[in-house]
Image (cartoon, rainbow, N blue to C red):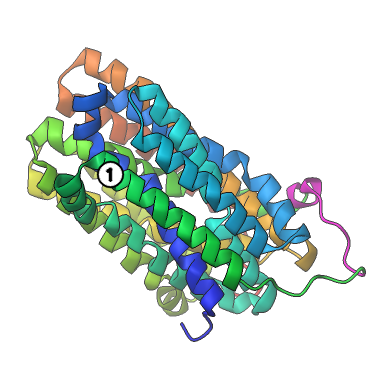
Amino acid sequence: MRSFTPGIWMLVLGYMLSQFYRAFLTVLSSDLRGELGATPGDLAISSGVWFAAFAVMQLPVGRWLDQIGPRRTASVMMVAAALGAGVFAMATQPWHLHVAMALIGIGCAPALMAAYYIFARNFPARDFGTLAGTFVAAGALGNLLSASPLVAVSDAIGWRATLWAMCAITLAIALIEWRVVEDPARLDSAHPQGRLSDILRLRALWFILPLFMVNYGVSAAIRGLWAGPYLEDVFAASSATVGNAALMMGVTMILGNYFAGPVTRVVGSVRRTILIGTAGTVAVTGALWLFSAESLALSVALLALVGLSGASYVLLIAHGRAFLPPHLVGRGITFLNMMSIGGTGMLQFGSRPVFQWASAQGGPASAYATVFLFFTLPLAIGLALYFLTPEAPDD
C-alpha cells in the first residue's frame, strides 16, 4: 500500500466502478424483469456486450498507454462510462440496456490496465504480482457495492435514481483522474516500437492464452449474471438473500486477490499456484453442476468459493507479464486482458442459448445445472493446456 500514490488510489476508484458495472445486473435482475421485461437471456446479452466492448478496446488502449500515457487514457475514456450509466437510467426497453452496457464497457476498458502499466514500468517484475493483487483486492470493493448495498440504495430511491447517482460519481472520478494520475517516464528511442505480431511470437504465452480466455470468465459470468436468477428461480430466494450471496462472492474475490501474492510465495511458483487454484475452481463449478438443487445454503457456499477464482486472473497476468520485454508492456498486458475479457464475453453470450435450450428440456434446476456444466468444461480444458506453460523467468 505504501507504493500507492494519490494517482494510483484514484485508479483504484475507477477500477471499483469497473467491478461494480460488470456485476450489478444480477442484483437488479428482478427490477429489470418487472419494469422492462428483461429476461435472464436479455441480461446475458447486456452483460456479454459489456465484456465484448471492453475487450475490443484493449488493443487501442494498449497503444494509447504507450503513446499518450495512462492519465489521459483512463480519465477521458471514463466519461463514456458516465454516459452509459445515464443511458441505463433512462432505459425503457431491454435493448437500451445493451447500448448502455456497451458504453460502460468502453469507458471501463483502461481502468485496470492503466494501473498495471504504471506497475510494470515503475517497479521490478518480481513485485508486479503483489502490487497487481493488492490493487485488484482494493478495487474489488466495487463487487461488494454491487451486492447488498446496491439492493438497499435501489430499494430506498429506485434503480433509476441509483444509476443517475452512479453517472455523477463516474464523471467525478474521471475528472479527478485527469488531475492526479502521473504518467511513467517515456521510453527513449533505443526501445523499438512494439507490434501485436511481436506478442504473438512469444511462445511462452501460447498455452497461457486458453486459460486466460476462460478463467476469469467463469467467476465473472456467475457473479455478474447467473447467481441472482439461479437463486431466485431454483430456491425462490428474496432480493436480500441474492444481495447477501453476491456480497459473499465479492468478499471471497477480495480475499483471494489480497492473498494471491503471499500464497504464491508459500507455494514457491506463480505457475503452481495457478494450477492449484484453477483445479479448485473446476471442482467447485463441477459441484454446482452436480448439486444445483441440493440446498440454498450449499449453493451459496459454492458460489462464494467460485469467487476465489478471480485471484488466478491476477496471477495469470503476472505470469504473462514476466515474458514481456519493456517495449511490449503496454500492448502486452492489454492484449492478455483482451483475451481474458473477450473470452468472458463469449462465455456470457454462449450461456444464453445453452440456458434457453436446457430450459426447454427440463425445469429451472436442470437448466442452471447445464449452465454450470457449460462453464466447467472449457475451464478444465484451459487448465489441461496450461500444464504446457513454462515457469516465469524469475520463479
Q: Is residue 287 above or below residue 48?
A: below
* Residue type at numbered disc 1: Ala
Label 1 belongs to which residue? 161
Q: 146 or 372, which is in the foreground?
A: 146
The reply to whether residue 170 is visible in this rendering is: yes
Q: Quadrant of the C terminus?
A: bottom right
- Quadrant in which residue 149 is drawn: bottom left
Helix, strand or loop at mark 1:
helix
Q: Is residue 248 above or below residue 42?
A: below
Q: Is residue 192 magenta?
A: yes
Residue at 44 percent of width and 37 percent of height: 101
Image-based side of 199 in relation to 228, left or right: right
The reply to whether residue 227 is visible in this rendering is: no
Pinpoint residue 346: horizontal percent, then vertical percent. Answer: 48, 32
- Quadrant in which residue 350 is drawn: top left
Q: Which residues are magenta?
A: 190-200
Pinpoint residue 370: horizontal percent, then vertical percent. Answer: 28, 28
Q: Is residue 335 magenta?
A: no
Pinpoint residue 10: horizontal percent, then vertical percent. Answer: 49, 69
Q: 162 or 206, which is in the foreground?
A: 162
